[in-house]
Image (cartoon, grey):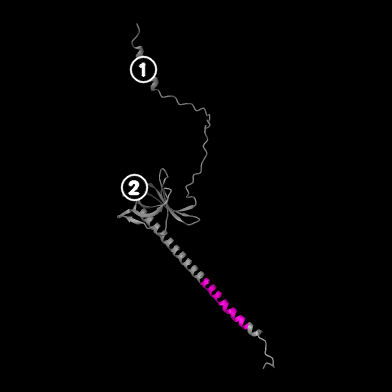
Amino acid sequence: MASTTEPTALKREDEEDDSKPAADDEDTGAQVAPIVKLQEVAVTTGEENEDVLLDLKAKLYRFDKEGNQWKERGVGMVKLLKHKETSKIRLVMRQNKTLKICANHLVLPTMSVQEHHGNEKSCVWHAADFSDGELKEETFCIRFASVENCKSFKDKIEEITESLSEESGETAEADAAANLIEKLSVEEKTEAKEDKPEAKEEEEEKKGETEKPEKSGDEK
């Protein structure tokens, strides 16, 4: 007659074996080469030839005219970048995780940043934006974490627009002066051309007088 305690004892031994921690795999020191080698790829952002004038974290909104409401564009770093060669300044903002462009437009002398409905942390502006691959007029609202960051953003934009306005004014004055000089030069040339026929007539008259034969004594 078989003993009834045998299955129980085997069960306990199995449980004890399962409860024991598995032995760590032994380190053989062998090195396994990767099956696929990945090459490093240089990623360009288009900002390599630009200097950063401002870099702040913010949340951007775009006004939807059809729905008559503000729509979130994303949270990320808003930058003001100045090109090293052309000196043009643009505003660029990318989403944090996806790096998708939320805003991308030039800062022009006509750009005006205003406070958004009494909220000291937010401001709005209009711009011809190119973030979606085509140039179109947009109304943006940006919100910062602090009043100081919002003020820094507004002050920097105002500083840039004032500088651009002065440069465009100087350029306009220089163009006007150049046009005036060119006009005067053209008028002088025209007057010179008009004077030439008169001078020619005077010269012919003088020439005719010298060529007249002198009267002889008999003719007197």
Vertical side of 209 occupied by 189: above or below: above
Residue 1 x, y percent position in the rendering? 34, 6
The one nearer the camera, 77 or 65, is 65
The residue labelled by disc 1 is 12
Instruction: Tell me: residue 75, above or below residue 204.
Output: above
Q: Nearer the viewer, residue 45 or 212?
A: 212
**Residue sitting farthest toward the front:** 219
Under circle 2, the secondary element is strand
Where is residue 216? Give x, y as percent. 69, 91
Query: In the image, what residue occupies the spot 35% across and 47% down?
Result: 72
The reply to whether the magenta stretch includes residue 43 is no
Question: Within the magenta stretch, is there residue 198?
Answer: yes
Give the amino acid at mark 2. Answer: Lys
Q: What's the residue at 55%, 77% (across, down)?
A: 195
The disc placed on residue 126 is none
Q: Position of residue 36 (x, y in %)?
A: 52, 33
- Decide: marks 1, 2 in contact (CB < 8 A)? no
Our reading of the magenta stretch's main secondary structure is: helix
Query: Mark on residue 71?
Result: 2
Segment colored magenta: 184-206
Kind of residue indicated by mark 1: Arg
In this rendered view, identify the residue nearer to me: 214 or 4.
214
In depth, the one of 128 and 213 nearer the eye is: 213
Q: Residue 85, relative to residue 182: is it above or below?
A: above
Looking at the image, the residue that sits furthest to the top is 1
Q: Earlier in the sequence, mark 1 or mark 2?
A: 1
Which quarter of the rendered picture does the C terminus lie within?
Answer: bottom right
**Element under disc 1:** helix
